[in-house]
Image (tube, helix red, strand yellow):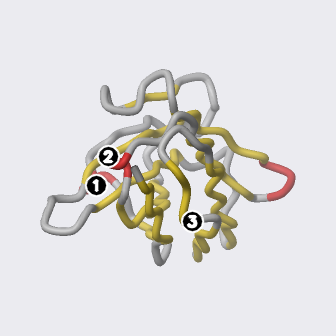
């Protein structure tokens, strides 16, 4: 099982970025997936998740209404669309997958992790 995150970079406050995570070794309809982030000097935070069925999503309060999680099963790829970016969104973002069918923003629930992609938002 492998996850490969990409799409990070530098954005201005108010701008947008889309993160992608290509997965291999499993299919997205059988695993719940999530996005996490860790800013310098801070603990890892669960940003968003989606269940294996795709029927349910979850978001941290800090990103609700601005970020959208999605997936393309045919492409084995998950996405995090980030709009109205703020300086406090600056962090390394990680994608993760869990055999559990339900989504979670707890990192302890996840079995597999991508390598992280850096998002920097300038104010």
Q: Nearer the viewer, mark 2 or mark 3?
A: 3
As helix, strand or loop, the secondary structure at mark 2 comes to strand
Structural distance between the alpha carbons of marks 1 and 2: 7 Å
**Mark 3 residue crowding within 10 angstroms, few (<14) / some (14–19) / many (20+):** some
- Dot 2 or dot 3: first in sequence order is 3
Residue that numbered label 2 is attached to: 46
Residue depicted at 13% across the width and 67% down the height: 41
Query: Compared with residue 43, is residue 59 higher up or lower down, i.e. above or below?
Result: above
Q: Nearer the viewer, mark 3 or mark 1?
A: 3
Q: Are circles 1 and 2 on residues that touch, CB within 8 Å? A: yes
Residue depicted at 72% across the width and 57% down the height: 77
Residue that numbered label 3 is attached to: 8
Structural distance between the alpha carbons of marks 3 and 1: 20 Å
Residue that numbered label 1 is attached to: 107
As helix, strand or loop, the secondary structure at mark 3 comes to loop
As helix, strand or loop, the secondary structure at mark 1 comes to helix
């Amino acid at each position: 099982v492998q996850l490969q995150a990409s799409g990070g970079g530098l954005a201005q406050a108010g701008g947008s970025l889309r993160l992608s995570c290509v997965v291999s070794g499993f299919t997205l309809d059988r695993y719940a997936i999530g996005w996490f982030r860790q800013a310098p000097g801070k603990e890892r935070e669960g940003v968003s998740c989606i269940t294996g069925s795709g029927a349910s999503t979850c978001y941290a309060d800090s990103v609700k209404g601005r970020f959208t999680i999605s997936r393309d099963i045919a492409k084995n790829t998950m996405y995090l669309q980030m709009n109205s970016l703020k300086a406090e969104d600056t962090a390394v973002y990680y994608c993760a997958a869990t055999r559990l069918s339900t989504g979670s923003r707890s990192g302890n629930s996840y079995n597999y992790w991508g390598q992280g992609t850096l998002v920097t938002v300038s104010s």
